[in-house]
Amino acid sequence: MLETLSSFYEGLNPVGRTTVITTPILLLAVVVLLVLERKYPYRKGLPFFREGLFLDLFWYTLVQSYFLQILIFGFIIAPLAKHFGAQFHWVSSWPVAAQVGFFVVTHDFYIYWFHRFQHNSAFFWRTHEAHHSGKQVDWLAGSRSHIVEIIINQTIEFAPIILLGANPIVVPIKALIDAVWGMYIHANVDVHSGKLQYVINGPEMHLWHHADHEEVYFANFSTKLAVWDWLFGTAYLPEGRKPIRWGLPYAFPKDYFLQHAFSVVRFDEGALAEKSALFRHYHGVRFRVLSWLGRHVPAAKALQGWEVPDGAPETVARRPDDNPAAAAPVTPAESSRPVNALS
């Protein structure tokens, strides 16, 4: 058995060998975060089978990521590399660790500004609102992202790695860092990182970013490095207080395909069901399948997509697409507040 595994590993190229190493690390990170969520929850009582789990795990994590990886690398990055690849070798001589660090920091800097732009643009907000639609945020919630958002960000993330002549193993290493960090900042874990939160981003600030509170609609845009928020006046971390509600302040579809359709044309699911027999049939099949699963596996009832009973009052604030007048970014005086606990 060991000889077979050894032969398989030796037969792989460097990228394949690196992936064989990064994959179990990713799975281990999932296990660790699941244990931490149960033992040190940021929001107590959040179930494992929470609303939208099937949507995030199956459609966004497995199906969408698989096909978009083929699209991005096969039909966007590969043609770019074929045309421009021989012209740039700017980082080829760097150590692999330096290459990884360079691309992690530069891409994170880009993500901060693009993320901030999405929150301030009524058009691009539609490519990002799905990411904020979950009312129960946990380690898997970060996987919920619009197709267009993923294509833009991952093309800008991985194309420079190829075009600038980086070692190919940088791709799976950076992909691992992105995945683990993305799960971490969304994890339902009560983290207290002290002064480190001025530099390294974590659940403390990012769970506020996903809150349905007007004061953070235009704050906490950082992904890996919180320093961008502190430098550019968009940090928000009130002392001794946590959000009381998450998600969007308006109705949002719970189905994968309807979420993407909603980004193109706004509609009311109830009204559409009355007008369209095709929609009623599609919605009916989905309802019956998930209802059957809920009856046979009681813990899976949340997969039906029923409302989350938060008991929190509805917000009157609106996101960019609902109220463009509210799309102006908050000023540093409103959003960036020194945190006594960190000083």
Image (cartoon, rainbow, N blue to C red):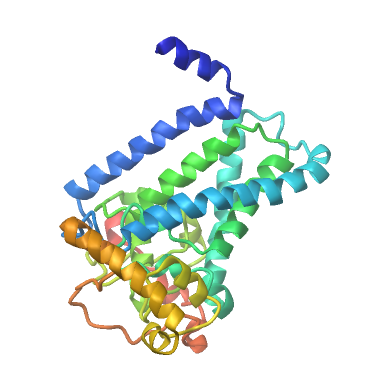
Residue at 37% from the left image edge and 74% from the top image edge:
283
For image coordinates 57% across by 73% down, the residue present is 124
Tell me residue 297's x, y (percent): 18, 55
Residue 281: x percent and y percent? 40, 76
Question: For residue 339, what is the image quadrant?
Answer: bottom left
- The image shows residue 82, relative to residue 23, as above or below, that is below
Looking at the picture, does residue 30 appear above or below residue 76?
above
Question: For this view, does 110 lie left or right of residue 337?
Answer: right
Please tell me which residue is depicted at 57% across the width and 53% down the height of the picture.
68
Q: Position of residue 63 (x, y in %)?
A: 48, 52
Does residue 79 appear in the picture of this structure?
yes
On-image quarter of the C terminus: bottom left
| Camera-nearest residue between 83 and 293 | 293
Q: Residue at the location (27% across, 51% down)?
A: 192
Splitting the image into 4 quarters, where does residue 99 fall?
Answer: top right
- Horizontal side, residue 159 vs residue 39: left or right: right
* Residue 202 pos. (x, y %): 37, 52
- Left or right placement of residue 80 versus residue 95 in this view: right
